[in-house]
Image (cartoon, rainbow, N blue to C red):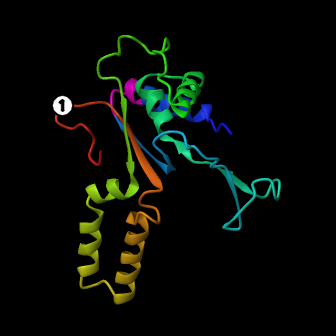
Amino acid sequence: VVEACPEGLLLAQDIADRIEKCNGGAALLIDYGEDGASSRDTMRGFWRHTQVHPLSRPGEVDVTADVDFAALRESVNQRIGLEESLKRKHFADTGKVPPPSTNIEQEKPINRPEAFGPVSQGQFLASMGIVQRVEKQIEADSTTDEQAYELYSALERLLAPDQMGERYKVLAIARKKEGLFPPAGF
C-alpha cells in the first residue's frame, strides 16, 4: 500500500511561498503521523467516534491516514515533488541509498522559509511551557478542585506518550532570523 498526499506537499510549499512573499510569518502544522512514511497501512475510517472499516458505510465514514511529515519537510526544504518523495520512500523501504536528486535546486535562495521538525506534540508543548502554565492555573485561588482535575486530565492527554503526546507531531515553516532559530519548541 502506498499512501501519498500530493496536495499536502503542494500546500506545505504554498505556505512557504506565502511566508517568503510576505517577507515574514510562520506556520505550525500539527497532526498525527510520523517522521517519514509508515511501514504499515495507516488509512482508517471513523463513524460516530468509533473506528470502522473505511468502506463500511460509504458517504458516512470519515476516512483518514497518518501524515508523512518527512515528505512535507522535504517538499519545503528541498522543493521535492511527489514522484521524488515516492522514489526516496522506495529506496528507504528496500534499504538502498537513493541516487542524488535532479529536482533539488542547487542554489537555495537566501532566507527562504524552511521546515523544522517534526517533534512530538508532547515535546513541543512541554518546551513551550504548558506544564508551568497549567500548574499556575491550578494553583490560582479561583480554580476549583473540579477545574484543577480537568486541567490536569487535559494536560496528561496532550503530553502522555500513550495518548496524544507521541502520536501527534508538530512541524514549523518559517524564515530564519538571527537569534531566533531554530524556532522555539524545535
Taking 42 as reference, is 158 above or below it?
below
Does residue 22 belong to the magenta stretch? yes
Q: Is 169 situated left or right of 128 in this image?
A: right
Asked which quadrant contains residue 22, the reply is top left
Q: Nearer the viewer, residue 100 or 58?
A: 100
Q: Nearer the viewer, residue 144 or 1?
A: 1
Q: What residue appears at the point 29 percent right and 23 percent down from the top-left corner?
A: 111
Coordinates of residue 70 in the picture (x, y in percent): 46, 36
Coordinates of residue 49 in the picture (x, y in percent): 66, 67
Q: What residue appears at the point 61 percent right and 31 percent down from the top-left corner?
A: 6
Asked which quadrant contains residue 45, the reply is bottom right
Q: Which residues are magenta?
A: 18-24
Q: Nearer the viewer, residue 84 or 5?
A: 84
Q: What residue appears at the point 35 percent right and 16 percent down from the top-left corner?
A: 108
Furthest-front residue in view?
95
Does residue 76 belong to the magenta stretch? no
Q: Nearer the viewer, residue 142 or 90?
A: 90
Residue assigned mark 1: 178
Coordinates of residue 165 in the picture (x, y in percent): 41, 60
